[in-house]
Image (spheres, rainbow, N blue to C red):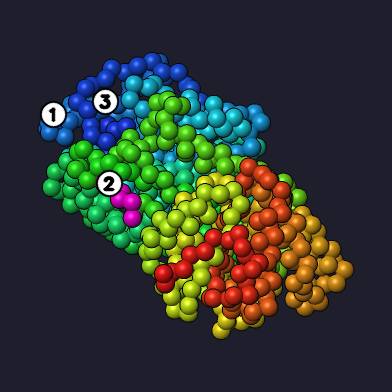
Amino acid sequence: MDRFSRMKGRIRGLRRHSAPGNPPNNGEYSKPSNNVQEPANTSNHGREASNPSNNGQENTAGGPPKPDPPPDLEETPSEPPPESHPPPFPSGVKVLHECPDAVVDICFVHGLTGDRESTWTAEKQSRPWPETLLPQVLTNARVLTYGYDAYVVRGEAALLTGVAGHATDLLTDLSTDREGASASSRPLIFVAHGLGGLICKSAILLSRNKVEDSLQSIFNYTFGVLFMGTPHRGSWMDDYASIVASVIGLATPTHKGILDYLKADSQLLESIQDDFWSMIRQLRENGRIIWITCVYEELPLEALGKLVVPQQTATQEGYPSLSIHADHVKMVRFGSMQNAVLFRLLGELRGWITQFEDEVKFALDPKLLRSLAGCQQSLAFCEMDDRIRDINRATSKWLLEHLEYRSWNDRDRSLLWIMGKPGSGKSTLLRHAVENATTKRQPNDLILSFFFHGRGTDLQKTRLGFFRSVLHQLLCSVPHALPGLVSVYQERCQKRGAFGEKWHWSLDELQDFFKSSLPKVLESHSIRLFVDALEECGEEDAVELAGEFKTLIKQLPPTASLLHICFTCRHYPILEPDLDHASVIRPEH
């Protein structure tokens, strides 16, 4: 038996069961109902992967009944008969929607006290929306849901497997399902609620270090993660424990046990957070993007009286976020396609799928994929993002509300010059503008930036460095738009040898590639380009680059996509005759 089979067949951590009358609720922290429901005959609405924890069994007619809902928080549950035994927890992978010609797998992962189906099922609906609504819009997606026993009940301390254990199970079960469906190399998107997001992070990190191809494929083919109410701060876990205990109403001894467990795990969770975001940044620097969007709740949970995962905890700097006018439980439940929030979420997922369909074409050709990665590395340089990190972060809301900025942002093609004296705060303004644009980015928006640095390396203060950086950003986001650049790299490496030793990129050819690629990029993406401290590349180059910006705005063919260019520069009278159509903001005025 190979290592993978042994892992698949291993005995999982001790399972815990709720006492009768106290089964898992329908979502994270939902206030329990005291209406006892009769067991219903259910059909298998989707194929379920084999799972050792529940022997691959579904509750069907004639099988064990579904567990009763938990008691109301204000009531004390009666003691169950000693001979009662709860049914197995619905765990493992279940296929909610098959798609013979699928181009993507979308896997839903519930949170603490959740359930793989009812977490995603709206009130008065019998089936989860990923099964009934999502396939209507994302017609080329296979839809999966994953369940794990992560429930905490009154009167019984949970024998929790822990985040790492659940992550290992997710990795094993999901890779097994995808291998069985001949889908190991199919792009994968996770949609995770609450603690499920931490389990997804841990599973991706585990997959990255696996030797077996099937297990490593989860890391290799994860293209996006939609976090819904997931805490992205490890130190928050101490509060998390208190929230769980207070909502479920644990008795004192058990309350202490749960607190101790979660607090003991908080150091591990903080490590997972740090390792995950470090991995994401490293992948981006190496030319691979995992799309991430964070969704946060706006309303407090009634049983708690406050937000379960506040905005500052549920969002991550530098990544787009969406708000949902609902509490932590209802934020993942949709009953109709008329729901505006669901429309936005599906639009986000559809945008990701459009992006990576082109990337998959590269992935199917190993030789082309290697050339793409090599070309990306040839454009990148170590100090590329140093300057923006050195600039103090400050909130400059007045810029976003400025009439000229709003006008620039609303037009199809527009150029904005933030003009000011040295020390007037231009760089701080631009950093804030970049971060705001990134946070509010739509799926098909590209946010490009370059911050010139007059005291930095040659590449930090020249047009060559500028074009290398922006082409690197474009190549990472839309590789299909620059096939000529990749071909030139591939050909030169074959004929001349290694980049950096036998040959280098020239300014003229990179400038030409940039100009020629934009029409192709704008067919499917809008572009916002931010350039700081234009004068620090020298007067002649500053004039040249400013003229190039104006030409792009005026001469590029019209498309449905937007092209916005914003740059900062000191008072350069020589630029003004060439930039008569540019909007101007003067911070000191």
- Point out residue 570 in the picture as x, y percentages from the top left corner: 53, 75
Mark 1 element type: loop
- Point out residue 579 in the picture as x, y percentages from the top left corner: 62, 65
Foreground mark, 2 or 3, reads: 2
- Point out residue 78 in the picture as x, y percentages from the top left corner: 13, 28
Q: Is residue 311 above or below residue 448?
A: above
Q: Find disc 3 in the rendering and name its residue.
A: 68
Tag count? 3
Q: Residues within 10 Å of mark 3 (few under 14, many from 20)?
A: many
Report the residue at 23% width, 21% height from top: 36
First in residue order: circle 2 vs circle 3: 3
Mark 2 element type: loop
Q: Find disc 1 in the rendering and name its residue.
A: 78
Q: Nearer the viewer, residue 529 or 259?
A: 529
| Type of amino acid at the residue the image marks with label 2 | Val
Judge left or right: residue 399 versus residue 362.
Answer: left
Please tell me in which quadrant of the rendered image residue 455 appears.
bottom right
Report the residue at 45% width, 67% height from top: 429
First in residue order: circle 1 vs circle 2: 1
| Extreme residue toward the bottom, this view | 455
Q: Residues within 10 Å of mark 1 (few under 14, many from 20)?
A: few
| Type of amino acid at the residue the image marks with label 1 | Ser
Report the residue at 47% width, 38% height from top: 344
Question: Looking at the image, do the residues carrying marks 2 and 3 touch, with CB atoms under 8 Å apart?
Answer: no
Question: Looking at the image, do the residues carrying marks 1 and 2 touch, with CB atoms under 8 Å apart?
Answer: no
Q: Find disc 2 in the rendering and name its residue.
A: 308
- Point out residue 505 in the picture as x, y percentages from the top left corner: 76, 71
Magenta residues? 307-312
Q: Nearer the viewer, residue 123 or 519?
A: 519
Separation of marks 1 and 3 at Cα, in angstroms: 13 Å
Separation of marks 1 and 2 at Cα, in angstroms: 29 Å
